Image (cartoon, grey):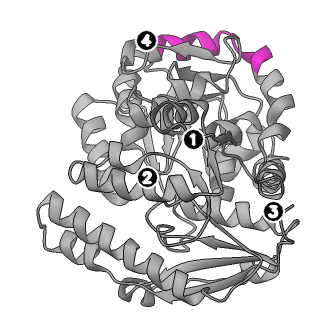
Amino acid sequence: MKQDISRLVYISAGEPDFKQAHSIQTFYTCKYLRNFFPVEIVYPLTIGSLAKKYKFDSYQKNRIIVKRLPATSFGRIAAFFHLPGWAKNTFFLADRILYSILVRLCYVFSRDTIFFSRDTIASLFIRKPIVELHSLEHLETNSLEKLTENLEKKTLYKAESLITITKGLKSLIEDRYGLHCHVVPDAYEPSIFDNLPEKSHARKLLGIKKRSRLVVFSGLKLAEKGADILIRSAKFIPDVDVYIVGGGKEEIDFLGRMAEKLGARNVELVGRVGQKLVALYLAASDVLVLPYPSNIRNEIFTSPLKLFEYMSCRRPIVATSVGSLTEVLGEKDAVFVTPGNPKALAEGIKRAFTGEGNENAERLYRKRHLFTYRQRAKKIARIIKNRK
């Protein structure tokens, strides 16, 4: 029988920046795990983060202890000087290895403590961590694949429990390494995305024409999620306004130039906004789109938290038939289209405007409670309490 748990320490390798998906997911995971265990989050304190005045009011309100540990920034320096890819990857690995050593030293005398992380390198020197896998890093790097895999394997084989966010990633790890994994998909926060205003009111608040036919795509990272395909599809649906919400400045500039070159005047690039404003754009929509291209990230590694947010909006969803979406959505839950095909995407959007998918939207709305962060935390807590 396992000893009582005095606290759960969440080891984050990223910064507490609520503009980043990993930080949002980390916060809400810890917020609801706090219902089961005392929770601490450890964040790296780098030279670059010193200038950023992060606020921790939300953590304090939810009785989550935040600890900042000094960390190196060799990887960022290498990127600044445009060093070769292998050099940048080496330094980024070194940053997280050194950080893992410091975390271990900081908690060397801790007893009855569970360590939880979604980063295999940052938990390299942690004894028996619970690891939540969002990918296998060595399959996405352009150099040092073997070294990265060997480091990842050291963490995987000593982990007390492994959690993956997709069935595809679970199968990959079990087939490749013979290790059992639990599947716990990503989630959304209902306090932000439930109880949205009526469509007309949302449009009034955003200054959008009341009678506009409006398609919305929301994402933090647009390039890898098919925003370019959606822009290319816009010319086939000139009577539809296409709003793309999210993305950093460089992405928006690139997509803006693409839209201008293609003459896609019906495309509006909103840029990155806060979660409450994202929810307002979803409420203003007629149809919601997930134009994910087919690649290893979208087929196996992505648990589509944007899909879970979409579910709360009672809107028809047009989605590409990639693994990360089809393992959550049933055949009749969305209008499915071929990935990477702008014309097929436009045809799917036209079908959604004819009423196809309205019934599916209601069914997905009723299922949304299965994908909240509260429910997710319950599953994770059960795994932790029942670990072998």
Marks 1,2: beta carbons within 8 A: no
Q: Is residue 255 magenta-colored?
A: no
Residue at image point 45% right, 80% down: 101
Name the disc covering residue 225, or none.
none
Mark 3: which secondary structure?
helix
Give the CA separation, mark 3 to mark 2.
29 Å
Disc 3: which residue: 32
**Badge 2 amino acid:** Lys
Which of the two discs, 1 and 2, labels the residue nearer the N terminus?
2
Q: Please name the residue shown 28% across and 30% down the image.
A: 263
Q: Residue at x 38, y 13 (%)?
A: 343
Residue that carries the numbered disc 4 in the rendered image:
344
> Tag 4: Cα neighbours inside 10 Å, few (<14), some, or many (≥20)?
some
Inter-mark Cα distance, 1 to 4: 39 Å
Q: Which residues are magenta?
A: 346-360
In this view, the residue in front, 380 or 43, is: 380
